[in-house]
Image (cartoon, helix red, strand yellow):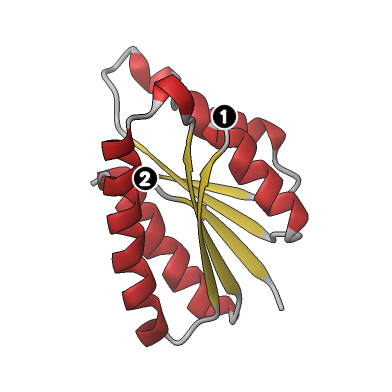
Amino acid sequence: MATIVVGFKDNPGGRRALELAIDEARRRNAKLIVVNSLRGGYDTSPEEINESRRALSGIEERLPDEGIEFDVQQLVRDNAASEDILQVASEDNAELIVVGYHRRSATGKLLLGSTPLAVMQGADCPVLAIAES
C-alpha cells in the first residue's frame, strides 16, 4: 500500500496540508501518516504539547470517517520537524510528503521557511508544499 506523510501543525498551513493529504490518500488509496513534531525540552512547554495532542485527537476522531488507513504520531524527541518528517517518510517508504507553509512578504517569498525547505531538500520522494489560504 502506498503511503503519504503529512507534517501537521495546528495552524492554517498545517490544516490545509492535512486536507490536501487526506484527499491525496483517498485518491491514491494510500495510508496517511500524520506527523506532529515538537522539539521538546526547554523549547516546548507542556501546554504546547497538550494543545497539539488535543488537535491530533480531533484528527484521530475524524479520519475513520474518511475511509482511509491512517496513523497519527506526535513526536517530541529533540529533532527539528523536518528531521522527524523525513525519518518517518523514509521508514515508511512514502511516495509523497505534504507540508504547509505560511505566505510571506514580497522579500520573504523567496524563502519558504526552514521546515518546508529542509523537507524538500532532504526528501527521497516528491514533496507538495501548500500555502495557507
Q: Is residue 13 above or below residue 28?
A: above
Q: Which residue is mark 1?
A: 78
Q: Is residue 30 above or below residue 8?
A: below
- Where residue 55 sits: x, y (%)? 29, 56
Query: Is 59 or 51 nearer to us in this picture?
Result: 51
Circle nearer the N terminus (1, 2):
2
> Residue at horizontal 33%, vertical 30%?
45
Mark 1 belongs to which amino acid? Answer: Asp
Query: Is 80 or 124 nearer to us in this picture?
Result: 80
Q: Which residue is mark 2?
A: 9
- Where residue 7 sits: x, y (%)? 48, 48
Q: Is residue 7 above or below residue 62?
A: above
Q: Is residue 99 left or right of residue 124?
A: left
Mark 2 belongs to which amino acid? Answer: Lys
> Residue at horizontal 49%, vertical 30%?
39
Direction top: furthest residue: 107
Q: Residues within 10 Å of mark 2 (few under 14, many from 20)?
A: many
Q: Is residue 72 left or right of residue 56?
A: right
Tell me, yes or no, if residue 124 can be seen here: yes
Q: Image quarter for residue 71?
A: bottom right
